[in-house]
Structures are given as C-alpha cells and as structure tokens.
Amino acid sequence: MARKLGLTPAAIDGLTSGSLPDLVTPGLAIEVLSSGKKRWRYRRKVAGSKVVATVFGNLFPAQSIAAAREWARLLNEQVEAGIDPRVARREEQARAAMTVAKAHQLYMTAVREGRSSRAKRPNKPRTIMDKLEIYHRDIAPQLANRSIYAVSETDLIRLVETKGRVAKVRANRLAAELKVFFGWAASLRGLEVGLAIDPARRLGDLRFPESPRSRKLSLVELEWFLRALADEPRHFQRGMLLWLLTAARISEVARAKSAEIAQGVWTIPAGRSKNSQEHRIALGPWGRSLMHCDAEWVFPSVKSDRPRNNSVWYKARDRVMNRMAEIAGHPIDHFTPHDLRRTVRSNTKRLKVDYETAEAMLNHVKKGLERTYDLYELEDEKRSWFLRWEQEVATLARKAGVAEALGVPQLRPSLSSPHTAEVLPQRPRIEPTFHVGSFESGATPVFAPATAKIVFSRKS
C-alpha cells in the first residue's frame, strides 16, 4: 500500500499537477495552477450548515508551509464555530474600509439632509462650515485613515487634551464635535457606519473652563487700530474696516457677495447669519465704497473663484496688532474680530442709541412675547445708527491722520447746520423763491406745504 506523502518542500517541488492535501492541518492543501505556480487552498464544511467554504491563500514559497498552516488554523477556528470565513473576511474588509474619513463623509451628508440629530432638520451653512473646519484642522490629521471601529476613548482623550494645551476654547469645541460625530455613528441614525460602542460618550467630562470674553477697544485703541490698518493691502483694509463699521461677524463679511448689496443696503441672508434671521445693514457712504467690488464675491480669493479663508484674515489681524503695539509703545491686549463687534455695541450707549436699536443693529433676536408680537424691524433707526457710527469712526480716522489712506469720503459743510458735515456729494439744491405782495391789515399768512406757495386768510 502506497504511503501518503506529507507537505514538505521536496513534495511540493515534485508536484506537477492537481493538488496535495496537508495531513497535519484539516482543510489545507496546495494546488498547481495552469501557469505552473503553486497556490495554497483551504476547503472545509462550515459546522452546523451545508456550506462548504473555499478560501485561497498566497503562492508558495512566498507563503511558507508554516505560515500556511497558521493561516488554515485560524480558518478552522471559524469553521468549527459555525462561521463562514468568507463572510467574516468580507466584514473585516468592510470594517477596514470604514475609515474615520469615510464615516465623516457619510456624517456630513446626514448633516446636510437633517439626519444627524434628533431634531431632524438641515443644518445651516455656517454650522456645516464650522464642522468641516474642526474636522480638517483637528480630527483628520490624526484619525482620517484609521478604521473608525479601532478608535478608542483614549485616542479621543489624547486628541482633546493636546488641543487644550494651546487652545482651551477650541478644545471644548473639538470635544463637542467628537461627541456629536461618534454619537451619530453609534446611533440608529448612523446605521451606515454601525459603530457598536461610542468612544466619545464621556468626552463632556474633559471640558476646560472658559472665561466670558469682555475685551473691547477703547477710543484710543481704535485710533491705533486705524493707523495700523493704513499699512495693510487694500482688500484687508476694506474687510477689517467693515468688521468695525457694520458690527458683522467675520464670516458674514468674508463671504459677502456683491449680489447681496442693493441701493446701499447689505442684506445678509438667513442662511449665512448665526440665528437664521435675515439682517439688513444700511451702509453709509464709506461703507458703500468699501463694499464695492466687480466680482461675485466682495473679497474673492486670489487663486480660485471663492471667498478668502478665515485664516488669512486672522493673519492680517495679527499684523495689525503688532503695528498697534509699535504705535502704542507697549504690548496690546489680544483681540478677536468678534471683540470689534463688542466694541461697536459698547459705544451705542455713549452715542445715545436706544437698547432696541442697538440690539437690532447686531441682529440679536427679540425675546419672549416681543419676538412673537413686536414685528417692527427698526430699519430706519438702524440706518440712522449705522451712519452715526460711521461718522464717529471717520472722525477717529481723521484725528489719527489716516483718513485719506483708508478711503474716508471727504467732508463738506452741511447746508442744514454749521456744526455738522455731509460726506456724500448731493444734487444741487433748488431754493424756492417767494414773491410776497401786499396784503390787507389783519391778514395772516398761511404756508401750503404741497405747493410752497404763500396764501392768506383773514382773521374772523
């Protein structure tokens, strides 16, 4: 009786056709391909079923006999447990392909369609932009290529704590976004990802303390700001001046479109405002000149047909702060674009602006029943206030000696009062001339405003 040969290098080298099973490991064999190359093959029935699973390994000798036996041993563990190794392999490949980057793409689709939260409503463009900014700046560099199923709580804690060492507020925003993203992936709303355990569920415990910001610029600092701004390129001058003149948020200014400006009024659409409320800003003559642009975007990017990124504005702010320190002769307390918004609001009381108008100027919504019943929009009052504030800043620019460099319109004496000035050229005034004739004693002149004509009525 012929003795069966075991798997040895010599036996495999002598194999010219067919296959040779391994006598040591069930299901393992080596077969000869039509090309003459020899490949490992595993074939065995799955326990508890009628399924025969066939899985192919690598070529010999790249995959050695010992390596092939270890590979088949792991497959035997699955088969004997009633698991089809082919199904398990497909699931493993799918899990490996579900990187954080791919899961985040699915998440952002849900965000845009209103499926990312229990509220079930689409997010605003500003919210979407903020989420993408946090992802690309803080999450993607560390986790993008990792399988989302392999991300642990420790990985996320390390990510947040590292950010917290340099920017505590941004670390809090990062932790909040991680909670929302991974929470969605582990919820029924994120079944496309199917994360079994949410590694971000306890990140709220890492919150860093935040102090409410109270920074505002004094009038002297505003003069330094205007002087420092005079040395900036014109497009940065325009944008940063508009932060100050309109009290708008940096993203609202940076992403302004020329089509949003009509008849001297800049309308920020609801989709771009923080509170989803349309906001109209009546621009003064200086503001209109700063907003003027022939392109689609008021502040177009140099290299592409899109607005400039926020990062370039912060770099410009840093340059201006450094110049302010040189002008002042001492360091300047750090300020953000939002602090200029706070500066504008803090000057409303000094300029005798009432509370409701000041709040409307910042597009703050009314509260309580006023929000429901008082629908008066204060457009005339806002127009008056914006013009008054523009004139105030223009006065500071003239005092600082940079009015011409910043494009402040020239003054001319007002015809209505010797103590005020007008900044826009106006149409020639046509002064009415009245020819007053004689009238009988006891008659009282009455002015008819519709005709600017003098008539008389006799006293009874």
Image (tube, rainbow, N blue to C red):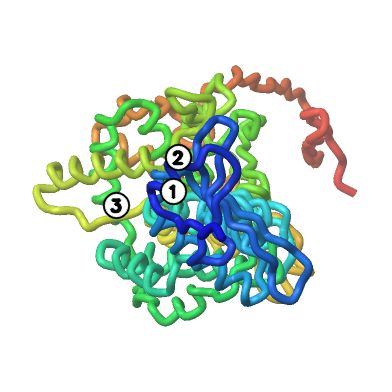
Residue that carries the numbered disc 3 in the rendered image: 219
Residue appearing at x 60%, y 63% in the figure: 356
**Does the rendering let one see residue 350?**
no
- Image coordinates for residue 216, horizontal then vertical, percent: 33, 59
Would you say the residues marked 3 and 1 are in contact, meaning their CB atoms lie under 8 Å apart?
no
Residue 272 at least partly seen: yes
Give the secondary structure at mark 1: helix
In this view, 239 is above or below 345: above
Q: Residue at x 47, y 30 (%)?
A: 290
**Mark 2 highlights which residue?**
242
Q: Disc 3 marks which amino acid?
A: Leu
Q: Quick check: 322 above or below 193?
A: above
Quadrant in the rendering for residue 86: bottom right
- Along the polypeptide, which appears first: circle 3 or circle 2? 3
Residue 428: x and y in percent read 60, 17
In the image: residue 374, left or right of residue 69: right
Between circles 3 and 2, the one closer to the viewer is: 2
| Spatial CA span between label 1 and label 2 | 83 Å
Identify the element where label 3 is drawn. helix
Q: Position of residue 409 (x, y in %)?
A: 42, 27
Q: Secondary structure at mark 2?
A: helix
> Which corner quadrant of the image does residue 169 belong to?
bottom left
Say which residue appears at 39% left-offset and 59% top-offset: 66
Q: Badge 1 local density, few (<14 within 10 Å), some, or many (20+)?
A: few
Determine whether label 3 and label 2 are within 8 Å by CB: no
Local packing at callout 2 (Cα closer than 10 Å; few below 14, some 14-19, many 20+) is many
User: Label 1 belongs to which residue?
Assistant: 11
